[in-house]
Image: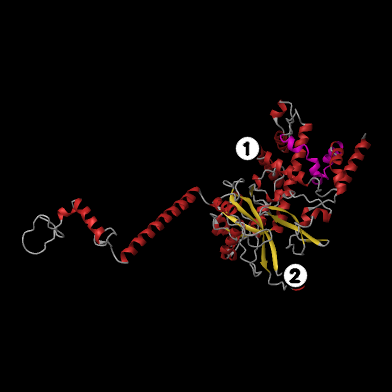
Amino acid sequence: MFGGKLTAALSVLLLADSCSAISVANARERADFINAMREAMDEREFMEERAKLRKLKKEKFHRNLLSKAKPMPPSLKKQPVAKEPEFMNYAKASTPSQVTPNRKLEDGDGDEDVDWGAFGFDVSEYSVKYTGCSAISMYNDEANGDDGDSVVETTRFVTFRLCNSLYCDSSSDLGCDSDYGDFILELGDYLTYFAEFENEMMEQFCHYCKQCIYFDTYFYGHRDLEDADADADVDAAAAEYFADDDAAADGDHACKFYDQCKSYPSVCYEVLEDDDYFVNMYAETYAAEYAATYGAVDDQYERIQYEDFFECINYGNYYLGPYCSGGEAISIGIFSDEMCTVYVGDSVDMNAYTGLDFDTYALQNFYSRKCLACKESDLDYNLIDMDAEDEDDINELCENLYVDSAKCLVNMEAEMAAYGGYNQQANEDKVCTFIENVEAGSYDEAGYININQGGESIFAYVYGDTSLAQVFSLVAGGFALAVMITWSCLLHKALRNVRSGGWKPPVQSPMSASPEKARDIEISRSNSGIMFARSEHEGEGVKTEGDEYTGGVMS
């Protein structure tokens, strides 16, 4: 029996070694596993228990740290304390808590900018919101166009927004509309940083599920652990943390996220291949199932490490590299030039040419619209291990993205303290305009200015940044302007008629009609009683009845 288990374990190790990278078959399964775990851990009731375990883990970390500390020699206590540099004092004045390790930025000429040593504001209070991906074609003054080479170089950028975590909206395209900063970074750098972030996330989820399934299997029904050692409190809390009393009472699984974790071995073998418990459990339970499900696919296709294609690389007669699709999605594309400028994926089947099965959605987490907290302790996957590599509470993704990106901080409340140097602040207007154009969809997938934007897409962008009250005001103002223009035209026409000759009698006046017509009109006027009030004096004497009176007013 023991020999059978050993043989199974060895076979699993060989299988894991042959598929040590993320295989094509489970690339999407890996992404689905991460998304399922994140959604499950966003529930409010889970947050409180997670905070409890985090507190216990932190206490354990401090106890271990103090146990290894050595007393300071008395001679060192008498030495004067070194004065802190000025930028440290500045950082303390501008932020209540966090200070990051010193970093030096470079301006466009390669000169090192001022070493500020801190963000200048509490980044842990913000979240990263992915807003889009776009290609930009620009003239390259170093290219001479010889040998058919183009003087136009295409660079792909990712834009993202740093929103206050209290107001960051995952369902919104831009995440927030106040207290935010806009950033832009080259696509390759963004993918590298996010890959590190996702690998850490995957590792945490795999370790969590391993322990969750472990407690479901071995501690189901007797989870009250007691130990005289102080660390046993953490273990007992962890047992309670991974277990679910309601589920146990119902005869269900004690692991709270059993549905999300039950298939974790098929996506976690790379992370946990050095774990003896996992290898034995995997050999006994999941090896046959995995081989039946994925073995044929792994034999048919060469394994893919997507990280290998985050930079433009040669592949036969073509080149492979990251590609922006539709202003949002990120995938691996095929190009005809060594700079990955000319995309030929519309005419060349990349999978057929390379023999690899690239999954269009393998990188879906890289362009997820969900807000990602910069505060390490707020991330839903920071469950077991505390980050002890630095003394701040800011995750590495936010640190790397913030430091290496171009910034537009005019809408951030801490804008004067948030720059990495004077050069960044001086060029802010140009950066803000550039980011605004990219987010507005001003460039097509080839990187050229998009002059064929439909009215629907333009309205969608404007409407997203305009309130209903502003739209109503614009419509009402336009209507009022049209009325004023019409009234002005009518008034202008009336004044022009007056200037051209003044008032003229109507065409039916006795003074302008023919004699016969005038007589008929005069009789009509007389019958109307008008003549009763008019007279005309012709010579001396008394007028008799029948005489004609014109002019004057009779008394």
Residue found at x 64% / y 45%: 378
Q: CA distance from mark 1 to mark 2?
A: 57 Å
Q: Nearer the viewer, residue 351 or 242?
A: 351
Residue denoted by label 2: 149
Magenta part of the protein: which range? 256-284
Residue 483 x, y percent position in the rendering: 41, 54
Residue found at x 25% / y 59%: 516
Look at the numbered disc 2 and give the secondary structure of its residue.
loop
Residue 464 x, y percent position in the rendering: 56, 50
Q: Which mark is residue 518?
A: none
Residue found at x 76% / y 42%: 207
Q: Residue furthest left?
A: 541
Mark 1 or mark 2, whichever is nearer to me: 2
Query: In this rendering, is residue 231 above or below 88?
Result: above
Magenta stretch mostly in which secondary structure?
A: helix
Quadrant the N terminus occupies: top right
Residue denoted by label 1: 44
Look at the numbered disc 1 and give the secondary structure of its residue.
helix
